[in-house]
Amino acid sequence: MSDFGWINGALTAARPQAVGALLRYFRNMDMAEEAYQEACLRALKSWPQNGPPRDPTAWLILVGRNAALDGARKHSRNTELPSDEAISDLDDVETPLAERLDGSQYRDDVLRLLFICCPPDLPATQQIALALRIVSGLTVSQIARAFLVSEAAMEQRITRAKARIANAQVPFETPGPVERAERLAAVAAMVYLIFNEGYSAGQDPARAPLCDEAIRLARLLLRLFQSEPEIMGLTALMLLQQARLAARFDGIGAAVLLDDQDRGLWNAKLIHEGLALIDKAIRHDRPGPYQIQAAIAATHARARTAAETDWAGIDNLYAALEQMQPSPVVTLNRAVATAKLKGPAAALAMIDPLERKLSGYFHYFGARGAFLLQLGRAPEARIAFDRAIALANTPAEASHIRQHLDRLMKDSEKTVS
Amino acid sequence: MLYAVICYNNEDIVWSWSKEEDAAVMSRLDVVHEKLVREGKLGPSLRLLPTTAATTLRGQDMVIDGPFAETKEQLLGFYVIDVADLDAALAVAKDLHAANPSSVYEIRPIALYVPEARANAPRARVKAY
């Protein structure tokens, strides 16, 4: 096999498991990363010649571990290294290692690696940067581009974050069920942060890979924790949101609201997978915030046209989410469903009390402006849209609001003349 | 002779393919598919969703999330082909492999083939996605 694309794919796919296992072995992040790096170099040399191993992950762990130990031995006593062929020929040892890897330890390795990246006192952006570097193996320059900062600044940020996790007490013993559930929840939240970082950036090609990366990590978690309905929900949620990517922006890059999107541009393959996962999750009868949000996204995905949307169903789902996870943003989203069911006046009454809490939130003023516009209160709508523009996070958001303002302007010209 | 040609691959990698990579492999495979259709050799063929979407029934009341077997390579899809013998089936598998080199193809003789019996059976490609 001389397919370097495949080898790179295999190395990327194996990374979380391999680095996780090496970390358990060395209990030191730098050593684990270096050992993995060395194993990758040897894989690039050995696999094209000898063919890929039956279990690339097991191969990388074993070769990485041996290489690091050899390195340590070489440092201390300058003894001779075994030849690469000897290391590459793993037929005898690979099988039992692979079997051991299939056990639960393997799963906890990946979970630990992700969990280490998201201590609650580390700012969200640093958690994301760390996970992208350590777990996903993105280069510092790729991450820097995604965060719109210089490579040097990102390097420094990651180094600082690494120093912080190195000093933290890293739990290496096998977690109990409660602890495992807590870690899984923290890790799921971080994966969704990675996704949102990419999703909110919209079309920016440097940040789009963050969404793919988050989905890849979620699929990995789902394979390791197959019966966790919230992980099914999280994966489904991201797949269903990502499915709309091609329809979310118009020709000039302005954001297009869900109602106005060309549903033919939605990615049916991702939708299909997302819906299948929700079906599985619902069977468990253990609802959670990710499942509910995924169910909302699924309701949109199932409607062939915006007019066919089951707004009553969506309103019920938001009501459930409000109970489970009360937040002004959830109420704001529910107001959109309320506007469809009971009209803009009811929706406006719902979001009026939120103004203080959401005074810095673009979507609050965007929605407020839209409701006011539907009520024919153009001057107030214009004020809301002006606030929204000032708070826009991306050019796409700003130009979407500007379209509203332009229309308002034209309408007022018409009434004047 | 009817054979099932069964495609295995590492779904972590395959389902992480970008849209472009996926489309490139599918269009290479389509060349093989079209040739088989012209030669009257191709029966039904399927591409499966990843095993994370699978559910397994073990016994009447034991529903388990996930696939039947946990392996490094997962079953991604299969073809039903109608060819003279194993050599001919292997030739088809080789063409498919050339179009999709990282996948492994298992050739399994089919013991019983029950043709499509639905009156409204689809005549064209049905894409679940």
Image (spheres, rainbow, N blue to C red):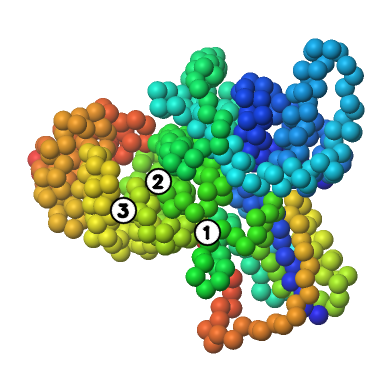
Residue B26: x %, y % from top left: 66, 57
**Could you give the CA–CA distance between mark 1 and mark 3, rounded to whole angstroms?**
35 Å
Residue A196: x %, y % from top left: 42, 37
Q: Earlier in the sequence, mark 2 or mark 3?
A: 2
**Host chain of mark 1:** B
Q: Quadrant of the C terminus of chain A?
A: top left
Residue A116: x %, y % from top left: 51, 28
Asked whether A112 or B7 is in front, the reply is: A112
- What is the secondary structure assignment of the residue under circle 1? strand
Give the label on residue A33, or none.
none
Tags 2 and 3 both on a single chain: yes
How many labels were placed on the picture? Answer: 3
**Could you give the CA–CA distance between mark 2 and mark 1, rounded to whole angstroms?**
33 Å
Q: Quadrant of the N terminus of chain A?
A: top right
For disc 3, the marked residue is A259
Q: Residue at x 87, y 22 (%)?
A: A81
The residue under label 2 is which amino acid type? Arg
**Could you give the CA–CA distance between mark 2 and mark 3, rounded to whole angstroms?**
10 Å
The residue under label 3 is which amino acid type? Asp
- What is the secondary structure assignment of the residue under circle 2? loop
Left or right: residue A357 versus residue A83 is left
Circle 3 residues within 10 Å: few <14, some 14–19, many ≥20: few
**Host chain of mark 3:** A
Q: From this view, report whether residue B25 is shown above or below residue B118.
A: above
Q: From this view, report whether residue B35 is shown above or below residue A391.
A: below
For disc 2, the marked residue is A248
Q: Residue at x 23, y 48 (%)?
A: A323
The residue under label 1 is which amino acid type? Asp
Image quadrant in which you'd find residue B69: bottom right
Residue A395: x %, y % from top left: 37, 32
For disc 1, the marked residue is B65
